[in-house]
Amino acid sequence: MTVYLDEDDVGHDSHSIAYPHLLLCMGVTVIMGDGSIAGAHISTGDTEKKTLSKLAELMTLIPATTRQMLLTGNFEIHFGMEDICSPAEKAGEIGYKGKILCFDTSAFKPKDGAFVRVITNGQVNNPTIEFKRNEKVTYATTASSPMGHFSPNRGIGFRVGHALKGSSSINVASPEDLNVIEV
């Protein structure tokens, strides 16, 4: 089941993590050595380091090393904001060294941000990145599970969130859509 992360939330799942509305925000996702996935929905510079710290804390609870890091969002808007960490600084905040896969949502020109879901494909393969312009997404309201979801503002617990309705079609990023940064 997909874990949906709103602003400043972190989470972990065995299959996928979704970021419902990346406009100013950035999805920071890590694929763990056991094939599971963890992530953080970074919003603004004043909460970024706290949220990345919670992701780093969550990663210590997973009995596997970090295999891969991904950044998803509108790079021009996000990195143009005040007090935002660079990709290398984001990696440093969670203790990651290696290649960072980057998916810049500005390439498909969303008017109101983007929906992005990252699906792990196991311990070896690159993840699948699904995306759609937010203005074309149909959301359903759901209650999230207390397992695998942590909000630095609200802690672990049930809450109402977003879910992509089954009738919404989705796009899949190709390898050509990704840039790689080495840190």
Image (tube, rainbow, N blue to C red):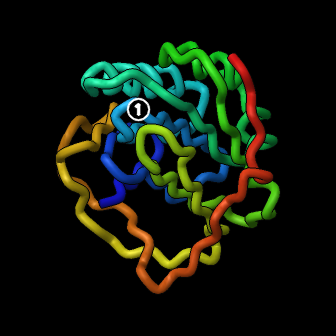
- Asked whether residue 105 appears in the rendered view, the answer is yes
> Residue visible at 59% across and 37% down?
70
Direction from residue 11 to residue 69 in the image, left or right: right
Tell me residue 181's x, y (percent): 74, 27
The quadrant where residue 128 appears = bottom right
Direction from residue 145 to residue 5 in the image, left or right: right
Residue neighbourhood size for the residue with mark 1, other residues' Cα within 10 Å, grouped as few (<14), some (14–19), many (≥20): many
- Asked whether residue 83 appears in the rendered view, the answer is no
The image shows residue 66, relative to residue 13, as above or below, that is above
Q: Secondary structure at mark 1?
A: strand
Query: Mark 1 sits on what residue?
Result: 32
> Residue visible at 51% across and 52% down?
118
The quadrant where residue 98 appears = top right
Q: Quadrant of the C terminus?
A: top right
The quadrant where residue 36 appears = top left
> Residue visible at 20% across and 39% down?
156
Tell me residue 100's x, y (percent): 65, 30
The image shows residue 45, relative to residue 140, as above or below, that is above
> Residue visible at 24% across and 35% down?
155
Q: Nearer the viewer, residue 112 or 87?
A: 87
Q: Nearer the viewer, residue 89 or 171?
A: 171
Q: Quadrant of the N terminus?
A: bottom left
Tell me residue 49's x, y (percent): 51, 20
The image shows residue 21, relative to residue 133, as above or below, that is above
Amino acid type at circle 1 is Met
Tell me residue 105's x, y (percent): 72, 54
The image shows residue 23, relative to residue 45, as above or below, that is below
